Amino acid sequence: MTTPRKLATFQFITFCVCLGLSFLFFSVAKNTVHVQAQDRFNAMVSQGLASMGARADEYGRTLDGVAGFVAASDLVTARDMETYATSVHIADGSYVLDAIGFATLTTSGPGGSNDDFVIRHAAPLDDFDEMVGESFSSNPDLLATALAARDSGRTLSTTPARHGAHWHALLIKPVMRPAVPADDLPEPEDTFVGLAFAMVDVQEIFSDLFPAQNDLIELEVFFSAPDGTVFQPGTESTHADHVPQFKFSRVHEGYGQDMTIQWSSTPAFEAAQPNNAKWVVLALSLTIAALILMIQSVILKRNLTINQTVADKTRELETQHQEKRSILENAMLPIISVRQSGEILHLNDAARQHLIAAGHRKDATGDFVQDLLPEVDIHRADGGVKVVVPPHRGTTEPRTLEVEKNTWLTADAETRITLMLRDITDSERRTLKIAETEQRWSLALSSAHIGVFDIDLENGTSVVSDTWRDIMHHPADPACQNPYYDKMQHVHPEDAAVVKKIELACLNGMTDRAEARFRIRVGQDNWRWIKSDAVVVERAKNGRALRMLGIQIDITESNKLEQMKHDFVATVSHELRTPLTSIKGALGLLEAQTQDDPDAGAVRLVQIATANCDRLVALVNDILDMEKINAGSMTVVPKPEKLGDIVTLAAEQVEPYASEWKVEIDVDTPDPDHHVLTDKNRIMQVLTNLLSNACKFAYPETAVTVTTAPVGDMTKISVTNLGNGISEEFRERIFQPFSQAEASNTRQRGGTGLGLNISRHLVEAMGGEIGFDSVPGEETVFWFTCPSTEDPDVAMVA
């Protein structure tokens, strides 16, 4: 057996090993977090460098276009240059280039020995007309760069220089025009025409390269002036006091200019990294070490505990008999122990007091229980039974006892009987009062004209209230043990199957309540509408329903009023369609006539009227669909359809609406051979409704995605967007008719509040389900299912 000292030594060794492993895991986690952060930083740097390269290529292409434009024209005028600048969106706020222009070569000095360039054209003229006629010689750096570009044939950039609040640089490209071939020169050299140039805002070149710039990482760019000094053209860091954890620096050559590009991480980037992961790993490792030590401590103490337990159990067995007798003697319930013959072996104090109250003055041990309590039969089967015994001495009211009989065997196989007596006289009295209360409740129900029924499903009997008999016109018949079942045989044949299905679903535990509306015959040819609501109030251990309780109300008159309301709504909706169609046609003609009208106000009014007319048409259509659903006349004709055609067509129909909200629709096209069993028109109605809602409540410049996935024998179709999501208080009523969120921005987006309710009814009518999952401020997914099926052509071949 392991001694406590050896266990303690082993425990200390284990502690040291666990502690070492904990700090090893800590180091690994720390290094992993750093490597991952470095990878993220490098990825953003690569993205920035790629954006810089793309911008540089774009400036080069624009300058190539200017050079090509000049080379292709015999005479370029200022208006031509202005027109070209406008066509490529120079200086309209959508491009980084501020100006473009053209300069020609001039010579000065003795014999024309000094080359110089004069600006002939600059665009846009409104901002840069003062540049026309200026000479490059006024700026040595500009002239040197121009000459180098001419001699090398390359596009070169001047050193950035400050002009007011901005830093600018000129991109210069020599313009060459093919010379006219001569007889003695089969391949003549190109003729130098001049220099095309573009003015670039240097600060704009290095800003907004990707969304995370300045928030997560910063870019600093350093140039060298002609005198050798280093300067930054407006790219200074906004976190001067911050020492970045991650940096990247390289020398880059662009259009003849050497620059040092330096990327550095910001405090926001460093705070976004999982730096606490190493501490979590350390804490978990130390916790595991503590648990291991705790388990070892438990093992160490286990042997001592076992020995202590054996000693305790021995003492417990020694006192068990005394404890049992003490419990028996002090029990508040009268307990009598007898032999099989009825001889009393023992009785507790409560039993003695009971016999004394009944007139027995001596100890009853050794007497026979049949002599003391003749109403108690000790030969009956075990269990409880109620007996009525004479009153106590000095009282006149008979007593009601509940006697519980238990038979057991001693260690010597001798039969013993224990009788437990409980006086339930007061309980029986209260039961009588409850019956009287129930009678008063019956009177109240009669006043409210609510019929109550109570069905004993195990015995096939039922109890009904007098009001129920009045409602059902069912006279009392003592011979009828189940009046509820007897009357329900007269349910209208068209409603009987529905009522039976609803009741079975409740009895089998599939639903909590059995709610139904049906017609029942109450006379020769008189049918009344009844509303029934029942619940199972008692079940067996195996779940089988034993008792059902419910109410039934005559709703014939209220149904007539409801039908009048439905008829009115349907009539009004149908009557609205004709004038709305005429109004919409007239507005369409009027809009076509006002398209060339300079009066923009009239055009806007026609557009507003057309939009509101479309909203009224949609509202009328939704109301008519709701009336069809309520009347049970909404029909669906399922047949095999290609799922890919459905989702593609729905996306195409909603595409113009998505453009209005600046949203894209992304469809994950399913397998071309994937078929579903559905009504194409109805599933298109559901899908377009979900897509339009998703576009309407999505963040601008985001995408609404449509995905499909098989789930067993069903197909799940999901529509996902990124938006504000669905609030908690609105989720429970989102599929109810005329339900809309209370937020002002939701109401500004329009809608009748009927689309989702209609969609739910259509999906359920086609054998599917509909639901949603939403995280406020993030992703919201509306989904519905429909049965999958095989391609009908393939199934026919098979």
Image: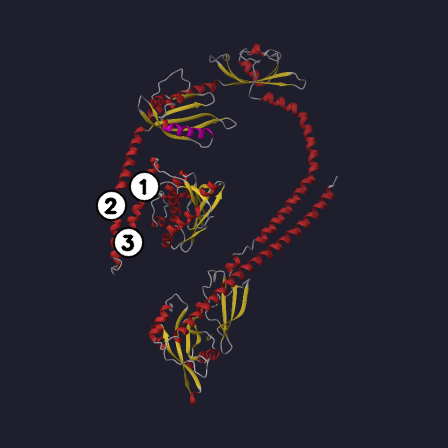
Instruction: Let me know if residue 505 is in the magenta part.
Output: yes
Separation of residues labelled 1 and 2 (CA atoms): 17 Å
Residue 493: percent from left, percent from top: 37, 26
Q: Magenta stretch mostly in which secondary structure?
A: helix
Q: Amino acid at mark 3?
A: Gln
Q: What SS does tag 3 mark?
A: helix
State which tag comes first along the sequence, 3 or 2: 2
Q: Amino acid at mark 2?
A: Pro
Q: Quick one: 665 or 262, which is closer to the camera?
A: 665
Image point 55% across, 54% down: which residue?
A: 274
**Extreme residue in the top direction:** 371
- Numbered mark located on residue 623 in the image: 1
Q: Few, some or many C-alpha atoms within 10 Å of disc 3 (few <14, some 14-19, many ≥20)?
A: some
- Numbered mark located on residue 579 in the image: 2
- Numbered mark located on residue 607 in the image: 3
Q: Few, some or many C-alpha atoms within 10 Å of disc 2 (few <14, some 14-19, many ≥20)?
A: few
Q: Which residues are magenta?
A: 494-508
